[in-house]
Image (spheres, helix red, strand yellow):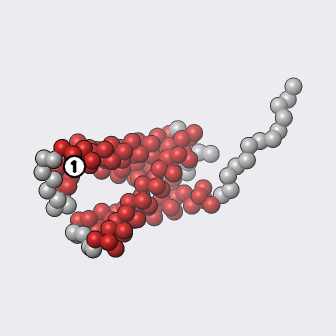
């Protein structure tokens, strides 16, 4: 099934957001985290641990964007968008509960993630709740 315009916009928004954040973490971690008031220093282990999930976000962002044009990838693209933009806020809420409130910039990131998640849930709601299609049992014509 082809994606609707609303679904394409949701995949575009989520894909571009994930790609941009991931690329920033991957290629400019010091600048990215400085925007949150976090000084990283030069610890190669820490930078590696940050760049790796940054690369993952780049990959998920590309997968979300591919679903716009490649309809065979649409279910995977939708799953990626929902997973990323629901998991990030959950992780931040765990942090709030365990560690206390973060800086205002991190709260802004949480709000953006919740907005993208809500947008994706609204766009994909009919696909999420529809029963899985069953394989055809029709016999080939001979």
The residue wearing badge 1 is 46
Quadrant containing the C terminus in the rendered view:
top right
Q: Which residue lies at the image location 16% right of the left edge and 47% below the top edge? A: 43
Residue 107: image location, x then y, percent: 28, 68
Q: Is residue 136 visible?
A: yes
In this view, 88 is above or below 42: below
Q: Residue furthest front?
A: 45
Image quarter for residue 110?
bottom left
Q: Which residue lies at the image location 73% right of the left edge and 47% below the top edge? A: 134
Q: Is residue 115 visible?
A: no
In this view, 92 is above or below 141: below
Residue 31: image location, x then y, percent: 16, 51
Q: 119 or 107: which is nearer to us?
A: 107
Counting labels gives 1
Q: Label 1, secondary structure: give it.
A: helix
Report the side of 116 relative to 24 (left or right): right
Q: Residue furthest top?
A: 142
Residue 9: image location, x then y, percent: 45, 52
Report the side of 44 relative to 134 (left or right): left
Disc 1 packing (10 Å; few <14; some 14–19; many ≥20): few
Q: Residue furthest right?
A: 142
């Amino acid at each position: 099934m082809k994606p609707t315009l609303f679904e394409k916009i949701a995949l575009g928004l989520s894909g571009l957001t994930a790609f941009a954040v991931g690329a920033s973490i991957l290629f400019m971690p010091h600048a990215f985290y400085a925007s949150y008031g976090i000084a990283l220093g030069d610890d190669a282990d820490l930078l590696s641990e940050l760049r790796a999930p940054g690369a993952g976000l780049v990959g998920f962002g590309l997968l979300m964007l591919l679903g716009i044009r490649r309809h065979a990838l649409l279910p995977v693209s939708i799953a990626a968008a929902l997973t990323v933009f629901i998991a990030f806020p959950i992780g931040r809420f765990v942090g709030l509960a365990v560690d206390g409130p973060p800086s205002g910039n991190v709260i802004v990131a949480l709000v953006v993630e919740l907005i993208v998640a809500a947008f994706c849930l609204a766009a994909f709601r009919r696909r999420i709740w529809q029963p899985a299609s069953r394989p055809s049992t029709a016999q080939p014509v001979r």
